[in-house]
Image: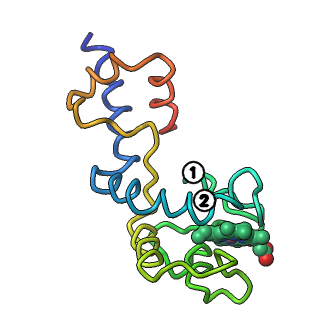
Amino acid sequence: MLRNGLPLCVMACAAALHAGSTHDRDFFENSIRPLLVKNCHACHTSSRMGGLELDSREHLLKGGNSGPAVLPGKPDESLLIQAVRRTHPRLKMPPQAPLRPDEVAALELWVSNGAIWPETAAIPAQFANIRLYLRRASPALRSQLIQKDR
Ligand code: HEC
């Protein structure tokens, strides 16, 4: 038990770290994800306008035809921020109407703090004991948690 337990814990803890703190997760779920869904997903999921999908951190970092959409910690240099501020010479997003200033500010803060994008690796608060969480996780979720951090 102990022999298997430790590496699992190390991997799961790393996965939890990658997914951000509870505060980061709440901020993302309350302020960022709904904003992207409402204002950007019509054109930046499967339709991939500009070659860009805005549905995962991986896709954001990979970016579209012009390169990475986000440089974590560097809002001023991030294409996505330049586009929503409408300071980029060509890209003004969303195309129809600007976001509200508080929405732009939320995106700036999110990128400044590392563009945390919590996914299934988020450990629910009730599973304070990480090994208990992993023991209860389905095999598919467990391998997903572990692969996420490779
Ligand atoms: C109505 C469709 C539409 C919506 C909604 C939209 N975009 Fe776009 N977006 C485009 C198109 C089309 C392009 C390609 C424009 C070009 O290359 O000149 C693009 C390009 C981009 C790019 C540059 C991609 C690249 O690498 O060239 C970024 C960043 C971007 N959009 C961010 C956003 C964000 C953030 C939102 C939501 C706040 C958003 N867009 C909403 C249509 C849309």
Secondary structure under the numbered disc 2 in the rendered image: helix
Whole-percent x, y for residue 114 in the image = 43, 63
Q: Amino acid at mark 2?
A: Leu
User: Given contact means CB atoms under 8 Å apart, are the residues at marks 2 and 1 in contact?
Assistant: yes
Determine whether 31 is above or below 18 in the image.
below
The residue that appears at 28% across and 50% down in the rendered structure is: 22
Of residues 64 and 5, the one nearer the viewer is 64
The residue that appears at 63% across and 80% down in the rendered structure is: 97
Q: Which residue is mark 2?
A: 60
Question: Is there any visible trace of residue 66 in the rendered image?
Answer: no
Q: Judge from the rendering whether residue 136 lies leftward or rightward of residue 85; answer left or right.
A: left
Whole-percent x, y for residue 92 in the image = 67, 81
- The quadrant holding residue 80 is bottom right
Whole-percent x, y for residue 131 in the image = 27, 22
Q: Amino acid at mark 1?
A: Ser
- Tell me the quadrant of ligand 1: bottom right
Q: Which quarter of the figure is the N terminus placed in? A: top left
Q: Which residue is mark 1?
A: 56
Of residues 70 and 35, the one nearer the viewer is 35
Whole-percent x, y for residue 82 in the image = 59, 81
> How dense is the environment of label 2, judged by Cα within 10 Å: few (below 14), some, or many (20 and up)?
many
Question: Is there any visible trace of residue 126 in the rendered image?
Answer: yes
